Image (cartoon, rainbow, N blue to C red):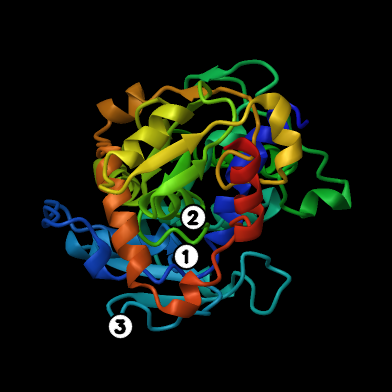
Amino acid sequence: MSNRRQFLGAAASATALLALHSSGLSRAARAQGSTPNADRKLKILILGGTGFIGPLQVETALERGYEVTTFNRGNRSGLFGGQVTELVGDRDKNVGEGLTALEGDERWDVVIDNSGYLPQQVRDSVELLAERCGRYLYISTVAVYDGEQALDFEEDGPLSPAPALENPGWNDINGETYGPLKAECDRIVREVMGERATIVRPTYIVGPGDSTDRFTYWVDRIHNGGDVVAPAYPDARIQVVDVRDLAEFVLTLAENGTPGSFNAAGPVYTREGMMWGIRGTVSAEVRFLWPTPEEEESLGLSPPMFNWKSDSMAFSNAASLLAGANYRPLSESTVATLEWWMAQDAERRASPRGWPEEATIAAAIEQLG
C-alpha cells in the first residue's frame, strides 16, 4: 500500500492530468444568478483556461467586466467566442514558440496560473511575468502537504520535500511525483513574488464539467439506485470543492489583491457521510454495501476518488472563509453534476474515465450481498 505522501499525490493527480482535456461545460451548467461587477476592471492573464477549472474562471471574469487574456497551446481556439485575447504557445520554452507570446511590454493586474505542474516551467513563467503583473495567483493542490508528518493541515503545514529534479524521472507527472512537484512550484512562486503571491490549494474538485469523472461516478451510480458498492474505510475523512465555488473564490482573491496561501476545501465529510449526502438527492431505493479492509483485495475494484486507501486527512478552510470563499451544499454539487452528465452525448457517457467495468461491479455485489 502507498505511503501517505504517495496517497496525497495519487488522490489529486488525476484531476490535474485529466483537467487538460476538454470539459464540455456550458453556461447552462453554471449556478443560477448573476456575478456582481467589481469596482475596478482588472486585466487578467490566465495560463490555461480551456480545461475543467479554467473556463469557469474566464466566464466569471468576463461576467465581472474584466479584460481577459489566455495563454495555452491553442487546442480549443475560439472557445469564448472572441471575448478574450488568445495567446498560443507552450509552458515548455523548448517546445515550438514556447513562451514567446508572453514576451514584450504587456502588463496584467493578475496572472492566474492553472497549468503549472513542472518547477522549471513555473519558474520560467513567473520570472518572465514578475515585473509585468501585480499579482501571481498559482493554483496549487492539497497534495503539496507532507503526509508523512501530519494528517491535519493548516496552510502553514509542512510541504513535501523538494523533488530530485536532476533525476529524469521527475519530469513525469504521476501519483508519486505530482505532490512534490507541485510543492516545489508552490515554493517557487512564493520565492519570486513574495507578498505578490497568492496560492490556492484545492482538494477534490467536483461539479459540472468534471473531466476526471470521479465524483460523477458516485452521482451516476447512486442515482441509478439498487445495490452500490461503497468505498472501504467509511470513517475516513474527505473534502471537496465545487468548481463554481473555486472559480468565484479565485476571482475574489484576484480583485481584492489578497496575498497568502489558502486551502480551497469544503466541510469535512466521512466517506459514509458523502455517500449518504449524495443519496439524499435520490428518490430511488439504494442499498450500500461496505467492504471490510480484508475484503477489498478480493473485489478487483478501484473506484474513483477513494481507491480503497485508508488515510484520513483534513484541510483547514478557515483562512479561505475569511478571504471570501463560499462552499455550497453537497446536494447542489450533486444535482448540477447529474444534470451536466445527463446532457452529455451518448458517446461521452458510454466512455467515462476510470470507472470500473460493469461485470466487475456485478461480481463485487454478488460477493458482498
Q: Earlier in the sequence, mark 3 or mark 2?
A: 3
Q: Are marks 3 and 2 in contact (CB under 8 Å)?
A: no
Quadrant showing the N terminus:
top right
Q: At which x and y percent is residue 186?
A: 57, 39
Q: Earlier in the sequence, mark 1 or mark 2?
A: 1
Q: Amino acid at mark 3?
A: Gly
Give the label on residue 82, or none.
Answer: 3
Helix, strand or loop under label 3: loop
Helix, strand or loop under label 1: loop
Q: Is residue 9 above or below residue 97?
A: above
Q: Which residue is mark 2?
A: 114
Q: Could you give the CA–CA distance between mark 3 and mark 2, rounded to whole angstroms? A: 21 Å
Q: Is residue 144 above or below residue 218?
A: above
Q: Is residue 185 left or right of residue 85?
A: right
Q: Is residue 334 left or right of residue 119?
A: left
Q: At which x and y percent is residue 184?
A: 66, 39
Q: At which x and y percent is residue 207?
A: 36, 52
Q: Are marks 1 and 2 in contact (CB under 8 Å)?
A: yes
